[in-house]
Image (cartoon, rainbow, N blue to C red):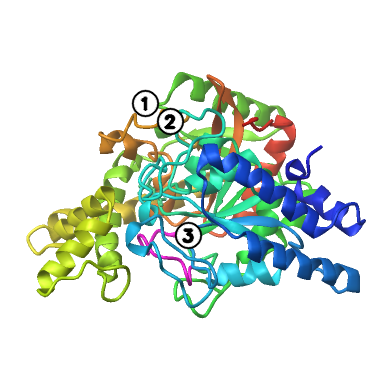
Amino acid sequence: MEIWSLAYKDLREGLEKGQFSVTEVIKTYLTHLRLLDKKLNAFILIAENQALARAKELDAKLKRGDRLGSLFGLPLAIKDVITTKDLVTTAGSKILKNYQPSYNATVVEKILAADAIILGKTNCDEFAMGASGENSAFGATCNPWDLSRVPGGSSSGSAAAVAAGQTLVALGTDTGGSIRQPASFCGVVGLKPTYGRVSRYGLIAMASSFDQIGTITRQVAEAAQVLQVIAGFDERDATSQKIEVANYHTLFNQPIKKLCVGIPREFFGEGLAAGVAEQVNKAIAKLEELGVRTKEVSLSTIPYALATYYIITPAEVSANLARFDGLRFGQNHWSNKLIDYYKETRGEFLGSEVKRRIILGTYVLSAGYYDAYYKKALTVRDSLKKDFARVFKEVDLLITPTSPTVAFKLGERLQDPLAMYLADIYTVPVNIAGLPAISVPCGVANNLPVGLQFIGPAWSESLLLQAAYTYEQVRGEFNLPKV
Ligand code: GLN
């Protein structure tokens, strides 16, 4: 078995028993990563020298018999919207092509302190806006299951890289589905924690009241291990919360309580592909065989979720992206007149989806339309939160498909933003309400992976991970593609 196909548990055991060194692991990964990236384009930057230097340090640490961090020797890749001190961070945008951050994001500090190794920065839709990876200024990423298809987005490179074995784990961000939807398209596990669970200090913001950092892994246990490290209060992020972080990965040996799971009718209607519905229903039946009680529920505000999302998030985008003007941040297009300086800099170095959202956001926030759009959307947001709170009085968790279809063809939806936005119809409600959710592969349709989404109440990561793990065990092995 290749080193890059080992689960972290086995990799760690091999390292501790001296079957291979950290340097060997990282060299193997880097060779595999480079080879496949010619086809996939999952990485914007490969941190070869840094990774090898760090591997050497970790080998020395092991030799000395020092205490090893909980992610010791874990090869990890980072979505390029998360700042890294020694590595250029582009957010998938031309405007930040040469941006060298002066500090590490909190999550980066934490994974480094736990002895993980950064292999590189992964490709993504520009400023995390997109559902296919095609909005990156550095070219689209291909889906390792079928190179003519998208890997999903915006954490496109992170999901493709984990599925292809270019890295063992990747960090992503999820504003409306950008961890779960690409995880679903690539057949891997995507965890979006509760809003406020993981520090966003050092994350280049898209929509600040939605953004959350999370994990993309091959297995649920790995998601638990990495979450354990990155979760927790951070005084540098005003939205992070002081809520106890459980010992997520030791939960798996404990019996799970008798679950009652809600199946929300609104997620199984028009637009759901037959092949996806079939796999999701099979997964639900498997859980029922285990004794999980299921119950049909209704969330009547769901039909308004996507529209609400596409009013509030552009509003926040228009404010957050004002700083990329060539003066405060980003490369510039020089002009003697200030207005031309802005116009040309932003006109040339920002992509069309980003510009569309800035314009949309400025519009919904403008004096004449604020009440009609933005304020109304905030009211709907509130109703949606209440709707979720009501069903979580009746059931422990919800189960839904992650995305209505399997991965679509590259180019297929580029001219049709609405079709693109629909790829996240089942994931955005979770971010609107700030809830945690996880996508786990549950089968294939037309030889492409299908994702099953578990949604929980705020701060229910333990239960969510336990339920997803239980399902993963009954589902059995899920083989990743050979690229
Ligand atoms: N696809 C959604 C969008 O384009 C979600 C993005 C995200 O979660 N970052 O906004």
Residue type at the position of mark 1: Gly
Q: What are the residue bounds of the magenta stretch?
A: 200-212
Mark number, residue 271: 1
| Amino acid type assigned to the residue bearing label 2 in the image | Pro
Q: Which residue is mark 3?
A: 212
Q: Earlier in the sequence, mark 1 or mark 2?
A: 1
Res 419 quadrant in image: top left
On screen, residue 480 versus residue 299, left or right, reads: right
Q: CA distance from mark 1 to mark 2?
A: 6 Å
Taking the spot 78% from the left edge, 45% from the top edge, the residue there is 3
Question: Of 76 and 349, which appears nearest the observer?
Answer: 349
Q: Is residue 78 above or below residue 304?
A: below
Residue 465, percent from left and from top: 65, 49
Q: Disc 3 or 2, which lies upstream in sequence?
A: 3
| Residue drawn at point x = 39 percent, y = 40 percent | 424
The numbered mark, 3 or 1, whose residue comes first in the sequence reads: 3
Circles 1 and 2, Cβ within 8 Å, touching? The answer is: yes
Seen from the viewer's position, the closer of residues 52 and 322 is 52
Label 1 near ligand 1 (CB < 8 Å): no
Identify the secondary structure beneath mark 3.
Answer: strand
- Label 1 SS: loop
State the mark number for residue 317: none
- Residue carrying label 2: 404
| Mark 2 Cα-neighbour bin, 10 Å: few <14, some 14–19, many ≥20 | many
User: Could you say which is closer to the camera, residue 275 or residue 39?
Assistant: 39
Extreme residue toward the right, this view? 17
